[in-house]
Amino acid sequence: MYIITVSYMTVKGRKEAQFSCPVVVVPGPGQECSLPSEQRLPCGPSSVSQSQCLSMGCCFNKQPPACYYPMDECTIDRHFVFSVPASLTEPPLSPSLLVAASNSTCKPQRVTSDYALFKIPMDGCGTRRVVRYNEH
């Protein structure tokens, strides 16, 4: 399992949120693809076909054509893709100040006043791999 920690500051101090992914990612039917266009992060080259896009575990929109990552998922190309809404805390946090906890160079791919969108490699930005054995 891969784990990444995102830190954010509130009036009560520093808080953290953890995201995790299995080592082997298999695309599933429960992907979050119903995203407004401003919350879509491109997946693959701009000329990718629908079948190529879907085979990469990404979402496809026919009009206008767009291949984009599902949100809050671990991708086949080994990334964590997730959003952090400003409304996560009260008062709202500042999405532009978010970074991966152990690496200040790992910033969001897109930021608005309402959210930050991250695409972080599973082997970078302070991600760590944890092996858990089944206990019987």
Image (cartoon, helix red, strand yellow):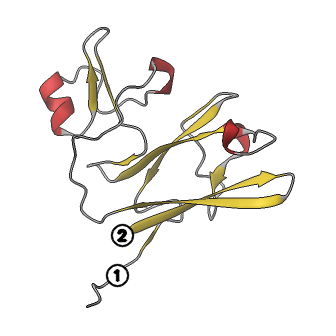
Where in the figure is residue 23, as x and y percent of width and height? Answer: 29, 66
Residue bearing mark 1: 132
Quadrant in the picture for residue 69:
top left
The residue carrying pointer 1 sits among few (fewer than 14), some (14 to 19) or many (20 or more) residues within 10 Å by Cα, namely few
In front here: 93 or 78? 93
Q: Which residue in the protein does label 2 denote?
A: 1
Quadrant location of residue 55? top left
Label 1 element class: loop
Question: Measuring 43% from the left and 61% from the top, which residue is drawn there?
Answer: 20
> Residue 115: image x %, image y %?
62, 34
Task: Identify the residue at image location x=53%, y=65%.
Answer: 126
Q: Is residue 31 left or right of residue 17?
A: left
Residue at 38%, 51% (x, y): give it: 79
Q: Quadrant of the N terminus?
A: bottom left
Q: Secondary structure at mark 2?
A: loop
Which quarter of the rendering shows the C terminus? bottom left
Q: Residue furthest front?
A: 136
Furthest toward the top, the residue is 63
Q: Could you tell me if the residues under marks 1 and 2 are in contact, i.e. CB atoms within 8 Å?
A: yes
Q: Is residue 39 above or below residue 76?
A: above
Q: Nearer the viewer, residue 34 or 77?
A: 34
Q: Earlier in the sequence, mark 1 or mark 2?
A: 2
Query: In the drawing, does residue 101 fall left or right of residue 58?
Result: right
